[in-house]
Amino acid sequence: MFLFRLMSFLFGHVSLIVQGKTLEKFINMASSRGIYLWDITKVGKDKMLVRVRISGIKPLRHIARSTGSRFKINSREGMPFLIERMKKRKVMVVGAVVFLAVLYMLSSFIWFIDISGNNKLTREEVLRAARQAGLAPGVLKWNVNKTAVEQNIKDKLPIVSWAGVYIKGTKARIEIVEKKMPEKKAAENQPAHIVAKKAGLIKDVLVLSGQAAVKEGDTVSAGQVLISGEIIPGEKPESELQTGEEAPSPITMPRYVHAKGIVRARVWYEGYGEARLVEEGKRLSGRQVERVCMKIAGKEIILKGPKEVPFKEYERREKVKTLPVWRNIKVPVELYNVQFLELEDYREERSLKEARKQAEKKAVSAIKEKMPADAKIMEQRVERINTGQDENLVRVKVFIESLENIGEEKTFTP
């Protein structure tokens, strides 16, 4: 069936409307003379629609006279008629051919390069190594030796243990796997103190290496040494000295280490939050439409999506893709995707309790951004700020006491 339809398209066929009293005789005579009719459909009283190849039209005229019927051509289909129509529209045909040729030419080049797997290496470093082996935006796809590019990336970037290059369409994808390098321990040989990141009240001190400089109950400020990396042999802590006793002079030279340990302290935070009792404004409704456009030499062509935005008020978000410059030639083609998100009016009324709860939530959220993830909240207190004025705002202050490790390493030169 497919072969028959293909031949009918190549040689051309027409659909005829045949009218007469003896339509069955018309069909039988055509069949007996080897004229194939198909898609025979009755469209009215003494009227039918049939399809026949161009070569069968002339013999059908004699059959129509013999059966007292008549027919007229309803439509013409197939390659001969298509060529005839194209001859009348030479400019359009030439334009289509030129467009396809340009499209084919542009699709023969690599315009975009994606890189994945580079955690320590920068995108520029990988692109530089690929460019040295012949892979860069603007090169012909068949001129790229993928094996050579992969090998050059591994040679130029020793941290890369494996590299793969894949080309699909106008995009090349470079995948790399970086070696797991052993962490450098040189910093551990550098003398360092444990100092306070922030002010607080010392809760406990755990010394793994170094000498404690503070004790439980001490109040410290940011930058103060908590565990010293300078160990002085024979030195007594101040807490062990008797009244009037002076600290003895060190007998030997001090020893310097990279201090390690945990110093937990009570830290206090203060945050502010507010919420409206009646809130009005505009927000996204959830409805959106998308438009895909192409801009060629300043002329915009809508490829997909509505011509008119169906929303009265909306937010526009746009992503533009341009072809990279190739050999100082800038292709004046831009492809961009535009999203139109509908905005709607809203009015939200809250009770005093709800507004206070929301304001407290904002204040706590602001405080937690300053706190480390492992901090433990010991106490939380909320105070409402009363301005003495009748306003549409509920203001609160939140006070949080946390227990956290406030120590951080700070190297020094003895």
Image (tube, grey):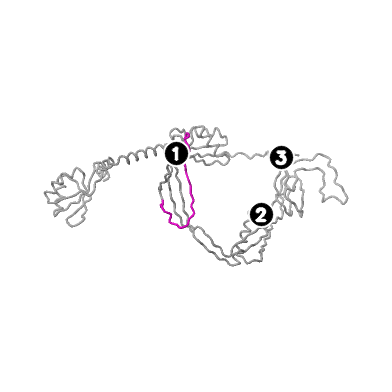
Residue 210, given in percent of the width and then of the height, sits at: 75, 45
**In terms of sequence position, does the residue under pointer 2 or pointer 3 come before the other?**
3
Instruction: Identify the element where label 2 is drawn.
Output: loop
Give the labeled residue for mark 2: 375
Residue 285, given in percent of the width and then of the height, sits at: 48, 59
Q: Are marks 1 and 2 in contact (CB under 8 Å)?
A: no
Left or right for 159, reference 173: right
Left or right for 38, reference 309: left
What residue type is disc 1 on? Answer: Val
Q: Foreground mark, 1 or 3?
A: 1
Give the labeled residue for mark 1: 331
Instruction: Assess whether residue 187 is covered by the magenta stretch.
Output: no
Q: CA distance from mark 2 to mark 3?
A: 28 Å
Magenta region's main secondary structure?
loop
Q: Are marks 1 and 3 in contact (CB under 8 Å)?
A: no
Q: Residues within 10 Å of mark 2 (few under 14, many from 20)?
A: some
Instruction: Assess whether residue 327 is covered by the magenta stretch.
Output: yes
Left or right for 225, reference 19: right
What residue type is disc 2 on? Answer: Ala
Front position in the image: 37 or 150: 37
What residue type is disc 3 on? Answer: Gln
| Residues shaded magenta | 305-328
Give the labeled residue for mark 3: 190
Q: CA distance from mark 1 to mark 3?
A: 55 Å
